Amino acid sequence: MKGLNQTAADAFAELMSFLFVEVKQLYKAGARAFVFHTLGPYDRSMSGVQLGKDVQETLRRNIITYNDELSRSANEFCAKHLDAFCLIHDTYNLTSYVMDHFADYGFKEPVKFCPEYKLHPTTEVDETTAPSCIGPASAYVWRDRLHPSWRFHEIWAQDVKLEINKRLDSLALEAQTRLSHSR
């Protein structure tokens, strides 16, 4: 990294150059399917909330800048490797939407978490094992101050699957259209 005086955008551009060296190595090794995930809104997790409004806002802007740079770099890579399947999954907006509509997804709490999870990492914490919790682990969007809960990971995985299927359907339709026009 260049140094302390560089902007977040410069730092993330440099980080992407390192990341995409590895992506290109995967491609050279035969990988042809890539899903790039943007960062979630960690400014809205307890880690971000507890930083205070000013630092939280800086974190939000930095996450957006990172996501923009990831998207730019992924789009550039994908444009040069047309034989690869590429998808940029918008984890930031998915997580924001789930947090804004948490009850629709069966969550009871969009920001806080139950600290008992650290004591019981392999069990579904409930009111009997953790009376201070508002419900089982699946009631929370976040597992801890920074990591999404297993229940959110299920939603995330379902969304990725949906986006992959949409993209595959779109590619199949494009191929079918090209084939019908070539006759």
Image (cartoon, rainbow, N blue to C red):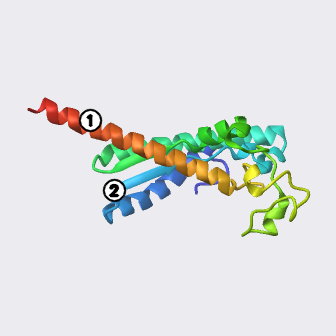
Secondary element type, mark 1: helix
From the top left corner, tell me how far across and down residue 91 is, in percent.
58, 44
Q: Which of 119 and 47 lies nearest the eye of the viewer?
A: 119
Q: Quadrant of residue 65?
A: top right
Specify the amino acid type for callout 2.
Arg
Can you name the residue that lies furthest to the top here?
A: 181
Question: With 134 as the anchor, is 179 left or right in this view?
Answer: left
Q: Is residue 133 above or below residue 120?
A: above
Quadrant in the picture for the N terminus: bottom right
Can you name the residue that lies furthest to the right here?
A: 132
Picture residue at 79% right of the left edge, 66% below the top: 118
Specify the amino acid type for callout 1.
Glu
Picture residue at 23% right of the left edge, 39% below the top: 175
Q: Which residue has dot 2 on it? A: 32
Q: Is residue 46 above or below residue 150?
A: above
Q: Quadrant of residue 171?
A: top left
The mark lying in front, picked from 2 and 1, is 1
Quadrant in the picture for the C terminus: top left
Question: With 41 as the anchor, is 145 left or right in this view?
Answer: right
Q: Which residue has dot 1 on it? A: 174
